[in-house]
Image: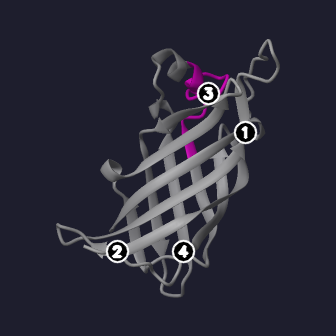
Amino acid sequence: MSTTEITTAVPVGTWTSDATHSSFGFSVKHMVVATFRGTLADFDATLTGAEDGAARLEAAGRVNSVVTPDENLTGHIQSPDFFDAERFPEVRYVSTSIARDGEELVVDGELTLKGTTKPLRLTGSIVGPVVGLAGTEAIGVELRGVIDRTEYGLDWNAPLPTGGFAVGNDVTLTAHLELGKA
């Protein structure tokens, strides 16, 4: 089975994320020397393409589904020092525009995290639609963006004895979505 690049930003229709074949991750510099990674296991995304070429992406994730390699660290990330999952149980992204820039997909929108909403540009790619083994149509979308976590009130940090901080401020967000036609 081959995939084909589409010529418009988003194919017409409503496309919903397949939880089994989609992932959302984040990464941040840790102790100045390494990159720490985590995932948000429970999220959903809907991408809608209209006949006139307009498109919209909406995604929401449950903060209490953050997964890291360490149970204690996961608890700390869900605490008020970071996500404050009890008071702010959801993170949301809603696009304001979706366009193609050559081969690149450019999605402008607003990210709401810990009660703060700020603009966020995501860039990446879109492939499809293709017809899968079960005869259903699907598209693939990969997106990436960077936020400054302190702009969203995720301020916890600790200075290192030789300089620098335990956690970097720039957080890279990545979404790998397989979306099926609704």
Residue 107 lies, in percent from the top left, at 62, 66
> Which numbered disc flags the more N-terminal residue, 1 or 3?
3
Q: Residue at x 59, y 47 (%)?
A: 173
Q: Secondary structure at mark 2?
A: loop
Viewer-nearest residue: 4 or 113 = 4
Q: Residue at x 54, y 50 (%)?
A: 174
Q: Quadrant of the N terminus?
A: bottom left
- Numbered tag placed on residue 88 in the rendering: none
- Numbered tag placed on residue 3 in the rendering: 2
Q: Residue at x 59, y 71 (%)?
A: 104
Q: Is residue 12 above or below residue 79?
A: below
> Which numbered disc flags the more N-terminal residue, 3 or 2?
2
Q: Residue furthest right?
A: 163
Real-space Cα separation, disc 3 to disc 4, in angstroms? 32 Å
Residue 61 lies, in percent from the top left, at 49, 44
> Which numbered disc flags the more N-terminal residue, 2 or 4?
2
Q: Secondary structure at mark 4?
A: strand
Circle 2/circle 4 CB separation < 8 Å: no
Which residue lies under the disc numbered 3? 84
Q: Does the magenta stretch mainly form a helix, a strand or a loop?
A: loop
Q: Quadrant of residue 13?
A: bottom left
- Numbered tag placed on residue 152 in the rendering: 1
Which residue lies under the disc numbered 4? 55
The answer to whether 11 appears left or right of 93 in the picture is left
Real-space Cα separation, disc 1 to disc 2, in angstroms? 38 Å
Q: Which residues are magenta?
A: 76-91
Q: Amino acid at mark 3?
A: Asp
| Residue 140 lies in the magenta-colored region | no
